[in-house]
Amino acid sequence: MTVKNEKIAALSDAELDARHAEKMRKKKAARDKIIATKTQEKGLVIVHTGKGKGKSTAAFGLVFRALGNGMKVAIVQFVKGKWETGERQALKRFADDVTITAMGDGFTWETQDRQRDIAAARAAWERAKALIADDEHQMVVLDELNIVLRYDYLPVDEVVEFLKTSKPEMKHVVITGRNARDELIDFADLVTEMEQVKHPFRAGIKAQKGIEF
Amino acid sequence: MTVKNEKIAALSDAELDARHAEKMRKKKAARDKIIATKTQEKGLVIVHTGKGKGKSTAAFGLVFRALGNGMKVAIVQFVKGKWETGERQALKRFADDVTITAMGDGFTWETQDRQRDIAAARAAWERAKALIADDEHQMVVLDELNIVLRYDYLPVDEVVEFLKTSKPEMKHVVITGRNARDELIDFADLVTEMEQVKHPFRAGIKAQKGIEF
């Protein structure tokens, strides 16, 4: 490393520029070649998992991108109160193109009632199935479904089987929540793990409007 | 594990429910206690990095959440063409509250011109500085700034120093891009690494409207 850095330091600006242009030319050629092989279009099953921030927020970003492209989007919240004020206010500007369904109750540590949680999860999933199978929406977000699957309130096999058999070819389904099941990861097309590197909670900073809700 | 699972399997549904209620009661008490200690409000420096998807998309989600909360937001794109069609169309519905500045040219493998990239990075940063320091916007997104810092087109020390000295206390700054510099991570309040677990590109699927742009 040191030798290499000294070598680079010895180069003139013009030499650095020429070297850069050559490197970037190669990079562009390689990228263009790869992109040319990617020709298939299909509706994706996307999973955002991990302990870090950004799982639901990135799903929310996908929702707005899709809405901006004129798509119709449905959102099913498996944990109540997760997408609140800011999101809902912003979505009002797209009221004709977006459907939001919230599971009736809170969840787990709020309800402290396992049977009620199971019934609510089942009701939300029945609604989700209709939205996944219809030909009206181009994207369906199942927010915090992973939590429900992790607690075994819904069998993961049933969810994967439904996606496999009943999701229209071109429909995108976005699933969020930490602790995604392996069965779901295996089936998904795109999986991102949001890893927490640093969190302001540790420094005594509370959840804030515009950032957390 | 087997022993524990067999024990759980031997429990009746009513016993499982009671055990669940007790566990959740404790969890809620612990959470409430933690939340009570978080009292500080401040503008956050947020970094989305890592090789996975969702860095810019989650920033975009934060933008809409903030807009939904009535905040004013500014976006500076350090790589041209990254936030396109969908985002821009969706942002039009909030035209009074959002400012977008795109760096004049493409970047790196597209331009293949180091001096032009450095000049464009400098121009975008000068614009960013004005937006970070003003009292008009409550959130500023510096999309793909990490790439510019990684290539040393802007000195990271200059960026951190400016954030430290000139960012108003309550302003949120969101910085995206892979390979975030350690100096920036050290200074940031909230850092998430988006890790790629699975990507559809590998399966020959191309970038699609509504998902990638």
Image (tube, coloured by chain):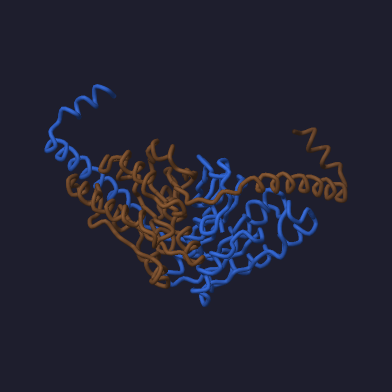
Chain colours: A blue, B brown
Does the rendering let one see residue B166?
yes
Q: Which image quarter holds the N terminus of chain B?
A: top right
Q: Nearer the viewer, residue A169 or B93?
A: B93
Occupied quadrant, residue B26 = top right
| Left or right side of A138 for B155 | left
Name the spot of residue B152 as percent of width and height, x first.
Answer: 27, 39
Residue drawn 51% across the image and 59% down it: A210
Instruction: Determine if residue A186 is in view.
Output: no
- Residue that protrudes farthest toward the bottom in the picture: A96
Work out whether A9 lies above or below B100. above
Give left or right: position of A146 versus A153.
Answer: left
How many numbered marks have been drawn onto this rendered protein structure?
Answer: 0
Viewer-proximal residue among A3 and B158: B158
Q: Residue at x 70, y 45 (%)?
A: B33
Taking B4 as reference, is B164 above or below it? below
B69 or B55, which lies in front? B69
Residue B14 picture location, percent across and down: 87, 50
For the point 42% across and 69% down, the residue is B90
Image location of residue A87, percent across then percent down = 54, 64
Give the quarter of the figure containing the C terminus of chain B.
bottom left
